[in-house]
Image: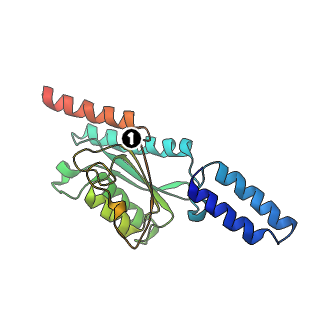
Amino acid sequence: MTVKGFIVYFKLYYACSSTGKSGGLRIRRLEVRILSGVLVDEKIYMNKAEDEKWMREALKEAENSFSNEEVPVGAVVVKNGAIIGRGANRKETLKDPTAHAEIIAITAAANSIGDWRLDGSVLYSTLEPCLMCAGAVVQARISRVVYGASDEKFGAFGSVIDVRNKDWNWKFEVASGILKEESANLLRKFFKKRRDG
């Protein structure tokens, strides 16, 4: 359980403690959610099993990149339990330095819902997002980022820099290491294939 979860629970308990039986019932339900690792205040109901489920979808996109001889990175954007955007790295195919999997997934998500504001959504990426993609997360108001493998060359969530140390006008949660071995193995396989010719 996070400290943030404790704070949310006690604030809500205090607010509802005088509402009688119905208020008490609401608190008991909320307590179960918090003890399950849910971020109640942001209404993002994701546990580890669900994170792995969606990361496997991102891995499918990374495998698509691999098949197209692109660095295998994939991403999906999830909101309300459904994928609203998918992206596979297409930097070489499009000859576009901005065609990262995360950018493509975020753009697809915005087009899907008809709004650039993606608050309440989660971005899953097989690789730690770079500074450009981290900027897109802030601009799109994404509420949570989950990534697999760390990126020691370009990672913007702690590996090279950490954008969370800046005072942005939008705050978001970050979780790392979800299916990191699967993500890293696919990258290793790609670069070995490239070295071997």
Relative to the observer, which residue lies in front, 78 or 129? 129
**In x, y percent, where is residue 180?**
39, 38
Please rate how many residues cluster around mark 1, counting C-alpha atoms within 10 Å: few if below 14, some from 14 to 19, many from 20: many
Does residue 151 lie above or below 162 as drawn?
Answer: above
The three-letter amino acid code for the residue at tag 1 is Leu
Q: Residue at x 66, y 49 (%)?
A: 35
Q: Nearer the viewer, residue 113 or 101?
A: 101
Q: Is residue 29 above or below residue 15?
A: above
Is 97 in front, or is 178? 178
Residue occupied by mark 1: 59
- From where the camera sits, is residue 107 visible? no
Residue that protrudes farthest toward the right in the picture: 21
Instruction: Tell me: residue 144, above or below residue 36.
Output: below
Colour convention of the picture: rainbow
Is residue 57 shown to the viewer in this render? yes
Where, by quadrant of the figure, is residue 172 drawn? bottom left
- Image coords of residue 113 (percent x, y): 46, 67
Where residue 13 appears, as percent x and y from the top left, is: 73, 65
Which element is circle 1 on?
A: helix
Which residue lies at the image location 56% right of the left edge and 64% below the top edge? Answer: 42
Q: Residue furthest top?
A: 196
User: How far across and how far down the image is residue 136, in percent?
Assistant: 32, 64
